[in-house]
Amino acid sequence: MAVNTNAEISRLRELMPASGRMNTRLMLDDRLTSVIETPFPRPWHRSHPITLNWVLWQEMSLPQRDLLFLQAVCWLSSVRLLKLEPYQGVVAAGAVMGIFELIQGDVVGTLAGGGLAAIAASQIWRSRQGAQSQIEADEAAIRVAQRRGYSEQEAIQYLLTAIEAVPVIEGRGVLNYLELLRTQNLRMRVQKTAATYE
């Protein structure tokens, strides 16, 4: 059954946690090759897009869409590039050192400061793009889904089936490395949750 675009956008906005509504904007683009796309957020932007391929999106069940969407929102909310952490401090220190040495005319010092900042920035990028940040977003999505009426078991199961459905819908056929890690983690959660309720 075809899904009404406006009704779905409104429903997804209501589904989001309040923090997500303030800094997330929903977009539709049927040219996307993926079901849902969440670009790495830029700290200088006030809001960050989540883009849906409307045609592919409708091929998923409503609970799968809910959990996939909540995961994207939770991942976006967790990427705070400007919060104070050791690597952010190293980037700032490296940049200041590089600028100071540039003013002093010290090429070696400028390169050292710039290099230090670049290495720290690449570490930040990796940590935000890696498996751990996605797994943490999965966990956060499950918690939000529970506040939206899903049981823990349902939320885990729907997110798991959504991740597994995406490559089929996108025509890739197989899960990529990150998706495999996430599904393995969710399967372990399914077993733990089932054991808890026995």
Image: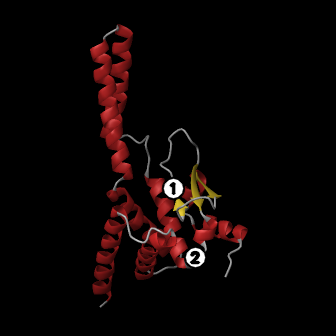
Q: Give the quadrant of residue 119.
A: top left
Q: Where residue 129 sits: x, y (%)?
A: 38, 51
Q: Tell which circle, 1 or 2, labels the residue nearer the N-terminal end.
A: 1
Question: Residue drawn at (55%, 76%), measured in percent from left and top?
Answer: 60
Classify 10 Å Cα crowding around label 2: few (below 14), some (14-19), many (20 and above). some
* Gap between marks 1 and 2 measured at Cα: 19 Å
Question: Residue drawn at (37%, 56%), measured in percent from left and top?
Answer: 133
Left or right: 76 as drawn, with respect to 57: left
Left or right: 63 as drawn, with respect to 194: right
Q: Nearer the viewer, residue 50 or 144?
A: 50
User: Looking at this rendering, what residue extends furthest in the bottom direction?
Assistant: 198
**What amino acid does circle 1 point to?**
Thr
Residue that carries the numbered disc 1 in the rendered image:
38
Left or right: 87 as drawn, with respect to 37: left
User: Looking at this rendering, what residue extends furthest in the top direction?
Assistant: 105
Residue 59: mark in rendering: 2
**What amino acid does circle 2 point to?**
Glu
Depicted 133 relative to depicted 149: above or below: above
Quadrant holding the C terminus: bottom left
**Which type of secondary structure does the marked residue at label 1 adopt?**
loop
Q: Where residue 10 sits: x, y (%)?
A: 68, 67
Q: Nearer the viewer, residue 63 or 111?
A: 111
